[in-house]
Image (cartoon, rainbow, N blue to C red):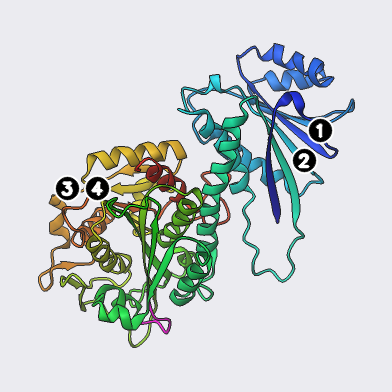
């Protein structure tokens, strides 16, 4: 395990410690040769002809040099090419990969000489967020889930000092990055928990414990209260399991004004999804421990919002169940009555996420929020359509669509708009109930969103995010490999920060 401690310093006043490494960035074409020569003057660092040629070449962008003339002990010289492949995730992704490679070395201190912002104004609107991506990269890249190893690696501390003349913006960036990544990592911890250690009840207890000493109020409904509230969709999904469902409500009043309507964030909290009677294939079924990823984002987002003391009101709503097989499981062909009074014909018991969300969206609507956003690992169809790089975004509100898209491009928790035309409604029309829980094989992510639309107050703006692709471990970036990703926290934190 690696513990990172971040510091800020001006280049003029830095004293390098022993066992230290300095990372310096160079911009291709920006007087690159002169800057390489300046290393001799600044650090008395003598690069060989081969090292200089490698740094300038098209095929190499990273060289490591031992400093035999003093401190720091070593340098990493990294060349940046500002071409069509450069994006706002560049430094986050690079730093995540770097800390992953360095964490096993005998390294005490890492110094980062931050590049001049003037070269990156095309990509970043503000200096502070530019710096923030570096910090986020190191935190996300150092994430590890080793809770269940009997023999854990000893903890290692690395001090990371960022060097810049813009101290005010740098200090702000470090603080913001730590707040946001605290939420991301809490979400990841929840996602990566095995299903036997994160049943709906244990999920609720985890959240209560996490927010015990905060300003966030947590309310948990057990099965008896869920039944009292006639949440038939949630009850039906959970009825096959020996672990009963839970309905969790988190309330954060940062605006300190009841007139400020809250934003409702709703998360699918299926702690394990076997598919039920319509059982899933066994291959990769273990990933279904992360079918509560949307709920994890709700918890992580509220954690970050409270730490940042955002002046906004939020309601986090988590509908949690375990979708299992037993003699009590719901069956294909069943009709389920939800808390709205609307009935659902069950076509496939593996289309359960939309059913637990139906009651959550009804509950959210009754709170009269100014808008509702739900997140769910809802459909494989969305991954087929968009891959693992982005979430599907479903809304009829063009203003919200634009805002979330921009937040996604900024944070690299990207979203892509999908159709919400009413023409798709015929695909989920039932002959015996108000709606059926599955359409044809075509447009599966869209028909899932259209199903959810039935349970949202039409007068409240609403966005559905299908995060089935980016929530699960993937090879897209250095910080999304191996473990579940915490996708969605950075996106929504940026979004709600601008919704004051």
Secondary structure beneath disc 4? loop
Q: In the rendered image, which residue does mark 3 sit on?
A: 421
Among the 4 quarters of the image, the one containing residue 348: bottom left
| 263 vs 55: above or below | below
Instruction: Select label 3 or label 2 by which is in front.
Output: 2
Residue found at x 49% / y 48%: 308
Compared across the picture, whether 79 is left or right of 37 comes to left
Q: Which mark is residue 16?
A: 1
| 427 vs 241: above or below | above
Q: Which mark is residue 395?
A: 4
Secondary structure beneath disc 3? loop
Q: In the rendered image, which residue does mark 2 sit on?
A: 109
Whole-number angstrom distance, CA of label 3 to CA of label 2: 55 Å
Among the 4 quarters of the image, the one containing residue 14: top right
Whole-number angstrom distance, CA of label 1 to CA of label 2: 8 Å
Q: Position of residue 317 (x, y in %)?
A: 35, 63
Q: Which quadrant does the N terminus fall into?
A: bottom right
Q: Position of residue 188 (x, y in %)?
A: 53, 58
């Amino acid at each position: 395990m690696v513990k990172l401690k971040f510091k800020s310093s001006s280049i003029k006043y830095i004293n390098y410690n022993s066992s230290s490494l300095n990372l310096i960035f160079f911009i291709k074409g920006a007087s690159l040769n002169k800057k390489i020569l300046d290393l001799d003057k600044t650090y008395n660092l003598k690069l060989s002809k081969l090292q200089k040629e490698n740094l300038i070449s098209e095929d190499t962008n990273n060289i490591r040099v031992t400093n035999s003339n003093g401190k720091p002990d070593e340098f990493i010289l990294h060349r940046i090419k500002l071409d069509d492949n450069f994006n706002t995730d560049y430094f986050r992704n690079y730093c995540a990969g770097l800390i992953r490679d360095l964490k096993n070395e005998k390294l005490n201190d890492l110094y980062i000489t931050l590049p001049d912002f003037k070269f990156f104004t095309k990509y970043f609107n503000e200096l502070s967020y530019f710096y923030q991506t570096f910090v986020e990269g190191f935190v996300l890249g150092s994430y590890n889930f080793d809770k269940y190893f009997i023999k854990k690696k000893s903890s290692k501390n690395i001090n990371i000092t960022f060097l810049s003349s813009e101290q005010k913006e740098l200090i702000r960036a470090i603080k913001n990055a730590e707040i946001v990544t605290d939420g991301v990592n809490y979400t990841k911890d929840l996602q990566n928990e095995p299903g036997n250690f994160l049943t709906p009840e244990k999920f609720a207890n985890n959240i209560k414990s996490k927010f015990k000493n905060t300003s966030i109020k947590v309310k948990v409904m057990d099965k008896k209260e869920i039944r009292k509230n006639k949440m038939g969709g949630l009850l039906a999904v959970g009825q096959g399991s020996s672990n009963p469902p839970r309905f969790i409500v988190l309330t954060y009043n940062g605006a300190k004004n009841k007139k400020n309507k809250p934003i409702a964030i709703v998360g699918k909290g299926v702690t394990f999804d076997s598919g039920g009677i319509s059982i899933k294939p066994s291959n990769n079924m273990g990933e279904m421990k992360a079918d509560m990823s949307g709920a994890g984002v709700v918890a992580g987002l509220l954690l970050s919002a409270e730490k940042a003391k955002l002046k906004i009101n939020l309601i986090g709503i988590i509908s949690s169940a375990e979708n299992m097989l037993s003699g009590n499981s719901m069956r294909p062909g069943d009709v389920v009555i939800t808390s709205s009074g609307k009935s659902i014909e069950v076509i496939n018991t593996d289309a359960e996420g939309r059913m637990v969300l139906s009651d959550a969206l009804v509950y959210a609507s009754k709170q009269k929020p100014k808008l509702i956003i739900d997140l769910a690992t809802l459909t494989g169809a969305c991954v087929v359509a968009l891959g693992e790089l982005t979430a599907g975004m479903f809304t009829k509100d063009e203003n919200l669509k634009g805002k979330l898209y921009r937040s996604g491009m900024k944070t690299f928790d990207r979203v892509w708009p999908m159709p919400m035309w009413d023409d798709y409604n015929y695909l989920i029309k039932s002959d015996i109930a108000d709606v059926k829980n599955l359409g044809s094989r075509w447009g599966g992510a869209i028909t899932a969103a259209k199903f959810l639309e039935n349970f949202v107050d039409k007068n409240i703006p609403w966005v559905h995010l299908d995060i089935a692709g980016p929530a699960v471990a993937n090879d897209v970036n250095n910080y999304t490999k191996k473990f579940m990703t915490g996708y969605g926290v950075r996106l929504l934190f940026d979004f709600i920060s601008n919704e004051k």
